[in-house]
Image (tube, coloured by chain):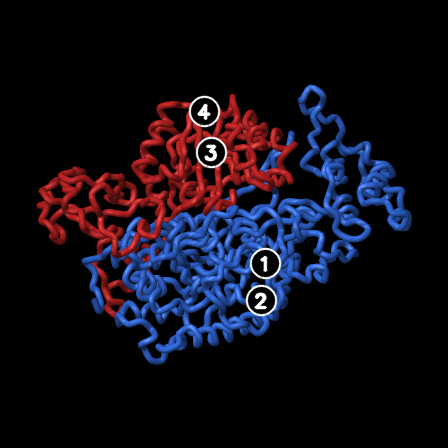
Amino acid sequence: MDPPPPSPSPAIPREAWEGCSVLLDINDGDRLAFFRLTPAAYLLTVKIGNKTCSLQPLVGRPFGSLFRVGADGLVPCTAADASSLRDDSTRDGDDGQVQDETRDNRSLVDNNTAQNLSSDDIEAMKRDGATGDEIVEALIANSSTFGKKTVFSQEKYKLKKQKKYAPKVLLRRPTARSICETYFKKSPARTGFMRVDTLSLLLSMANIGPYSDALVVDMVGGLVVGAVAERLGGTGYVCSTYLGKKPSSIDIIRMYNLSGDMASRIAQAPLNDLCSLQNSGNTPSVLNGSSQGEVTKPIAVSTEDTQLSLAQQGDTVVSDEKPQLSAEQPVDMEVSEPPLEEEHPVQDETSSLDNKGNDDGSIASRSLKTGKTPSPEKMKYWKEHGFSSLIVAAPGNEVESLVADLLPLLSDSAPFAIYHQYLQPLATCMHSLQVSKMAIGLQISEPWLREYQVLPSRTHPHMQMNAFGGYILSGIKIHNTDAVVANK
Amino acid sequence: MMVPLDPAGKLSSQRRIAEGDTVVVYERHDAMRAVAVRAGGVLQNRFGVFRHDDWVGRPFGSKVHSSAGGGGGGGKKGGGKAGGFVHLLAPTPELWTLVLSHRTQILYIADISLVVAYLELVPGCVVLESGTGSGSLTTSLARAVAPHGRVHTFDFHEQRATSAREDFERNGLSSLITVNVRDIQGEGFPEEHRGAADAVFLDLPQPWLAIPSVSLMLKQDGVLCSFSPCIEQVQRACDAMRSCFTDIRTFEILLRTYEVRDGSLNSGTANEEAVVGPRPQKRKKFTPSGENSGCTEKTSSVLVRPCSTAKGHTGYLTFARLRV
């Protein structure tokens, strides 16, 4: 029934290509920004310090490469530049043992007089063409207290100066992990405060894998739909269902660099349609009052509707984002995507966009391809076979009745995972599932994640820790012969 | 069927249990086992006697009753409360982790899911693993890279490697996983995988000995994960990583679980008799919400609190990327 999976090209693209989405990590996570290297990449710029740099040098470079800010913009770091990076700062003695530190800070007084270079001196050095690293060396040489600091303190000082005068830009590949972490760190409200370990648990607990037919309620901006599509790798389907008439935004899927095959696996359908399928046995195109289908031309009509809803989403995403961000946290994250313009109608669905999509229309038409309404055949297939996985990420919604509506759409023995910000709604939901015997193996979990700093003589957990990644209710849907069953 | 290799292999309402299938027999939330269905086969447990032949042709997720008296149950086939019963579930990597035979200490779902996400595994990837242990993580790695990817797993213990290989064979994973006997600490990974691995996972007593080899196996920007129970091991491993790796991060992950109860709390005023809430009632008959069940509480009477038993520590997970 499904077409065979695409022939294996490299599973992971290792270089940035024109049109791809990238994540720039400036100064070790201080600043994070998503960009799309559109064909007019030379026009796109990023401001680092007080220098505006074009993104053109990023095209064709390997993910994981480091750049510094040169006279004319971003320059790939050489091995020499790399040697000044902090990862390389082992302070071992010749025999491999860490020297015991004898200095301490008893005589150090912080009165702002230690540095002999003035800001004018530094500006003069910059005008003379000194590199950032040269300025850092000069600052160290002109510091009267540097020699008295402990070696750890010296490292910290050097790193701080490097960040200011010799900022580094790391070209990161957007993946479920990096996208989730970025949003969690910089703009967590947009993704319902979903932490990376929580997201990874949802994917495992719901058994997302090849050929899955995954049903997803994603009200976390598309983070989950994208992660599921990434795990499907072009096989199976993810049906992103929504309450009411209009889908909530799943724009974050655009960050994922999903290939044409992967993106084509994403469909959007209102929950009403899926449920009415279950009850009446008819596909929605036969029902009146459905906002999506018309018997004769389902594709054309749905294209129009999806066009509208995506254009609306485009506006909402671009205009709502800034006020929302400023209300919550200082904005250190930017998302630069071309605004969604007038969409072109869906082209040939079988045309496979490979990773190096070249045509200008590819981005717009790709985002339209995702979120398309499933065909009546697909809806019928899901009715007869059920979905094989369910993930619900609606952290602000009431869950008990939502889950009661969703579970009958799953095949028996299908696992599900429900993410929520609040414990009581999940507890009530779990209890009602126990009583109605619609599921077994029920468990409410709260993941706990702690990061460590591991450095010679300085190993300890990070000082800052996130204390809450949400709750998950997981379980397995079963065939219930005992409960009162309606309309079967 | 644990990891579908084609569309026909996935779970669906249309699938029926067949001879040769592996089912996970769910007795209770903490009592499950994997059973290979065979003609004439019989399962005996505290709930009764269950004939495999009764299972064939049913959908996964079915509830089946014991066919003969087990304990004092009476065992009416299809009867309501009389017979003991179990549920027959489709196997998944998560369920496999809970039912597999432990030849070594294994990884559980919290560590497994973080590893798969942080190694950035997607279908088609090639991942190297050492040691294989009991194959708990290996099974989830296979799901992550299926249908075209590969897991090459190595263990220095010949018998355990054989047991793992047999498990993967029975679970239909042989086309995804190759098992080899090799001492990775002493010899490093085989030359044939040089530059071919998207990710490498180490669960070794002295992982720093394997780090140089890992740096040759990984593609640029590929991800390494090293799992170690002790912080000293983590420190030595991180030291070894610093020359070739960047983005070195170490985590611990644990799951806290919660228990849910239906009940009420004691009222506390001086003049009233203490009212003790009803005992946990999982099997209470479902009452429509409109009925007054006789309780005086107006709000939900579902109480929830964390479980008092929990895992305190499994190991530290250190992730790093190969420098470009």
Q: CA separation, marks 4 and 2?
A: 51 Å
Q: Is residue B150 above or below residue A249?
A: above
Q: Amino acid at mark 1?
A: Ser
Residues A477 and A424: in front is: A477
Q: Is residue B145 left or right of residue A459?
A: left
Please name the residue that numbered disc 3 is placed on: B129
Q: Chain of mark 3?
A: B
Please name the residue that numbered disc 4 is placed on: B182
Q: Amino acid at mark 2?
A: Gly
Front label number (1 vs 2) = 2
Q: CA separation, marks 2 and 3?
A: 42 Å
Residues B91 and A408: in front is: B91
Q: Residue at x 70, y 33 (%)?
A: A89
Q: Chain of mark 1?
A: A
Q: Residue at x 35, y 31 (%)?
A: B165
Mark drawn on residue A361: 2
Q: Amino acid at mark 3?
A: Glu
Q: Secondary structure at mark 2?
A: helix
